[in-house]
Image: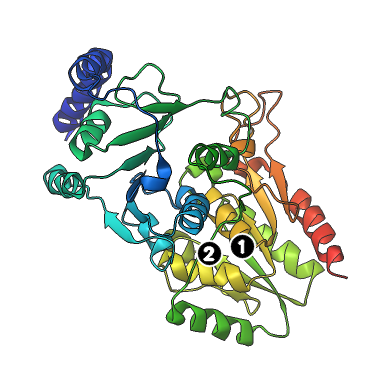
Amino acid sequence: MNIVRNIKQINRDIKTITRPLRDIIAKFILDKKRRTDKTLDFGKVKTILFLRDDNKIGDMVISTILFREIKKKYPKIKVIVLAGKDSKEIIKYNPYVDEIIETSDNLFANFFILRKLRIYKIDVLVDFYRFNPRPYHMFKLRQINPSYLIGFCKNNYNMYDISLNNANFDTQHITNVYKLVLEYLGVENVSLQYDIFLSDLEEEYAKKIKEMFSQFKIIFLNACSASVKRNIKLSQLNNLIDLIYEKYKDVRIILNINDEMKKYMINKEYLYIPNKKNILSIVALVKVSDIVITPDTSIVHIGAAYNKKMIALYLDYSHDEEKINIVWGPNYKNAFQISVDSRDSKIDNDIKNIDNKLIIQQLSKIIKMDK
């Protein structure tokens, strides 16, 4: 086993060392100018493809701004989204999206997906990737071969017809970036509200939960995220639940936790731990909740779609170039943020170091808003 582990580590080290050279070679081969300079007449565009194959649920929620506003301004345009397995669920019932194409983890299968998009003869492709594109990303764009390619911060790349730039991309909310896209495409006076549409099945599930807890204020408490440092730890979670119920007997807590945490969670009469795991069932639970508490930005954006009163828990990003708490923040007046205070570097930048008493204090302020 040690031999296999060592071989894998050596392979990772080689990839890291050779990455700059591979990037240079890929750029030389793939980043050749193939289009003459032209302006985009978006009124004549028949198809637009949004590259959202990163499988990030929160990003897809925010992207719904674009689908709606473009479709309203240009109803005849065909809106296509290349999406990941999980993120596609967010737009499964979106009336502003004409076609969803799911990307694959299998490179061979992906090749045929890209060839399918090439046959579509895409007029405009919007590439959301804001960093220097890796070799496979450039290969992907070449395979799709859109007539017009829109990117962000890509002035050094010839394959993009237009690069939309803003010096404050890392310090302003992401919706400002999307607004920039819409303005470039001639869409003005836009709404920056997110859209999530549920099927009749999820709506019925939401109705059932609402009726079950009709006598109570519902708090949706999400404990998990994509990063260990952004998870609410089990002991912290148990303490927070007890503090909430100790102060507010008229609440019921919908608890969204992973399977591992479920093994150790003591069931209590004021807790509801859903068995449903698909993302739209989670959306349904957020929709019927009165208050959302979460360290995960996907849930933040889902809550924002319904303008929920929210406590969003963030790490300390004050030393980072990208201010994630701002760029990916809730960005509406009913949401409140609490961040880890690690300024003196003595405290680990981990959600576990947010004092539950701070969360309770903010919760009290929110509950008073309803009285």
Q: What residue type is labelled 2?
A: Asn
Residue of label 1 = 221
- Say left or right for 361 vs 316: right
Quarter residue 138 falls in: top left
Q: In this view, does 174 lie above or below 297?
A: above
Contact, CB < 8 Å: mark 1 with mark 2? yes
The kind of secondary structure element at disc 2 is: strand
Amino acid type at image mark 1: Leu
Left or right: 337 as drawn, with respect to 349? right
312, 177: nearer the viewer: 177
Q: Position of residue 46 (x, y in %)?
A: 32, 51
Measured as percent of width and height from the top left, residue 219 is found at 67, 68
Q: Residue at x 51, y 79 (%)?
A: 203
Q: Is residue 121 visible?
A: yes
For mark 1, does the 10 Å Cα neighbourhood hold few (<14), some (14 to 19), or many (20 or more) residues? many
Dot 1: what SS?
strand
In this picture the colour scheme is rainbow
Q: Give the number of callouts.
A: 2
Where the N terminus falls, by quadrant?
top left
Q: Where is residue 312 in the image (x, y as percent from the top left)?
A: 66, 50
Question: Height in image: 296 above or below 283?
Answer: above
**Residue 355, image x, y percentages:** 72, 46
Closest to the observer, 200 or 250 = 200
Q: Is residue 83 among what the camera can see?
A: no
Kindly identify which residue carries mark 2.
256
At horizontal 16% and vertical 48% (from top left) the residue drawn is 119
The answer to whether 267 is drawn above or below residue 234 in the figure is below
Label 2 Cα neighbours within 10 Å, binned few <14 / some 14-19 / many ≥20: many
Q: Which mark is residue 283?
A: none
Residue at 34 percent across and 40 percent down: it is: 125
Q: Which of 285 and 222 is in front in this view?
A: 285
